[in-house]
Image (cartoon, helix red, strand yellow):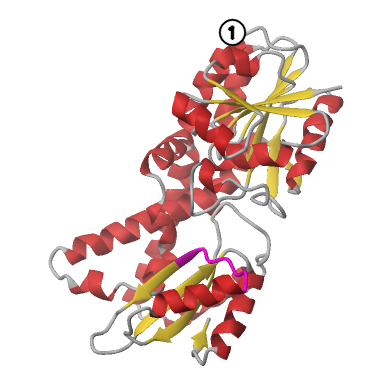
Amino acid sequence: MSTKIAIFGVGLIGGSLALCFKGKPGITVVGHAHRPASVEKYMNHGVVDHATLSIEEAAMDADFIFLCVPVGNLDEYLNKLSQIPLKKGCIITDVGSTKASIATAAEKLELKDVYFIGGHPMAGSERSGVEAATPLLFENAYYVLTPPPGLPDKVYESLELLLTYTRAKIIKVNPIEHDRIVGAISHLPHIIAVALVNQVCDYNDTNPLYRRLAAGGFRDITRIASSDPIIWRDILLNNRGVMLQMLSDWNKGISEFIGMLEMEDGEGITEAFAKANDFRSELPEHRKGMISSTFDLYIDVPDHPGIIGKITTRLGENDINLSNIQIIESREDVPGIMKLSFRLEEDLERAKKVLQNMDYSVSL
C-alpha cells in the first residue's frame, strides 16, 4: 500500500523532511512550489519525487501533509486545505515554532475525516533554503507533537511512526506549555541578542571602536541576532502574550542586577553567576536544539598569501567538513586569528589533530 506525503514549503526544514521520507518503501513525496523555477530546483536537488505549482494536486490523495511555511502563513494554508476534498483520514501537521494559535485555528475549522496534529522539530541550521536540506538535520533532536484532545490513538501513532524516519526523539506536549518553554529557551534569547547588538550599534554611532573591538566572544554570544527579520517578526507576534510576560520577568532580573551594582552587592552577583553556572552545567551538550550549535576552534595565522587555501585544502583532504571560516583581527600589527566552525564535534577533534600536525597553535 503506497503512502503519499505532501510538503508545502520545501526549504531547510521541509526539504530535510522530504529527504528523510524519500526513497523509503511505498512512500511518494510531493513538494508544492510557488514558482516554476522552484519546481525545477526541488527536482534538481532530488529532495522530492514530484513537484507542482498546484495546491490541489499536491494535497489530493495525500496521506500526510506537512506545512513547512512561515508561522505567519500557517492559518492561510490551513484554510485553503480545508476547502479541498482531502483523503479520508489524512493527517495535516506543521513545523512552526509556536503551537497554541495554529491548534486553535485547526479546531475552529472542524475538519471532517481529516486530522491536524501540531508539530515542531527542534533543530535548525545557520544555513537556509532547500540547498541546505539534509536527512541528518533532525537526528538526535527533539521533535515535539501537540495532538488535540480526543485525537484517536491510532492517528497519533501513525504520524509518530512516520517520523521515526527522521531519527528524532518524539515527545508529546500541550500546545500552551510548548509555547512557554520555547518562548523561554529560543524566542527570548533572540530578543535579548537583537537588543544587545542594537545597543552596541547605537554606541558605535559616537565611537567606531565599538564595532572594531566587538570581535570573537561578542559575535559568538550574539550570533542569533542575525536571524531572518521577517520570520522572527511573525514568530514573536504569534507568541505575543507569552513574550510580554517573559520580557516582564526579564526586566525584573535586570532590575535585580541594577540593584546589586548600586548597592555594591558582590555576594549577590557571585550567587547569581553561580546559580547560572550550576544550571547551565546540567544542560545536555550533545543534543540538537532550536538554536543551532557549532563547534569552534581558533588558530593564529600569519599574514601570508594562500594561507587560508592551504588550511582548508588540508582539511578537505581529510574529509573534514567546515561550517564557516572567520578571520578575526581585533588588534593592529599582530597576526590574525582564524576561527573555524564545524557542525559535528568529531570534525572539530579531527581538525584539531590535523592543524596541530601542521604546527599550528590551536585553542577551543
* Quarter containing the N terminus: top right
Q: Residue furthest bottom?
A: 359
Q: State the residue at coordinates (49%, 42%).
A: 129
Q: Residue furthest left?
A: 206
Residue 125 place in picture, x, y as percent: 54, 53
Compared to residue 51, the image places residue 306 above or below, namely below
What segment carries the magenta color? Answer: 318-324
Q: Residues within 10 Å of mark 1 (few under 14, many from 20)?
A: few
The residue labelled by disc 1 is 83
Query: In the picture provided, is 364 more to the left or to the right than 106?
Result: left
Residue 241 place in picture, x, y as percent: 47, 37
Residue 196 place in picture, x, y as percent: 33, 61
Q: State the residue at coordinates (64%, 17%).
A: 59
Compared to residue 21, the image places residue 55 above or below, namely above
Q: Nearer the viewer, residue 152 or 347?
A: 347
- For the image, the number of numbered tags is 1
Q: State the residue at coordinates (36%, 54%).
A: 194
**For numbered disc 1, what is the local secondary structure?**
loop
Query: In the picture provided, is 161 more to the left or to the right than 37?
Result: right
Q: Quadrant of residue 80?
A: top right
Q: State the residue at coordinates (17%, 70%).
A: 208
Q: Nearer the viewer, residue 245 or 232?
A: 232
Q: Amino acid at mark 1?
A: Gln
Q: Quadrant of residue 276?
A: bottom right
Compared to residue 117, the image places residue 83 above or below, namely above
* Magenta residue check for 128: no
Q: Is residue 54 visible?
A: yes
Q: Is residue 275 visible?
A: no
Magenta highlight: main SS: loop
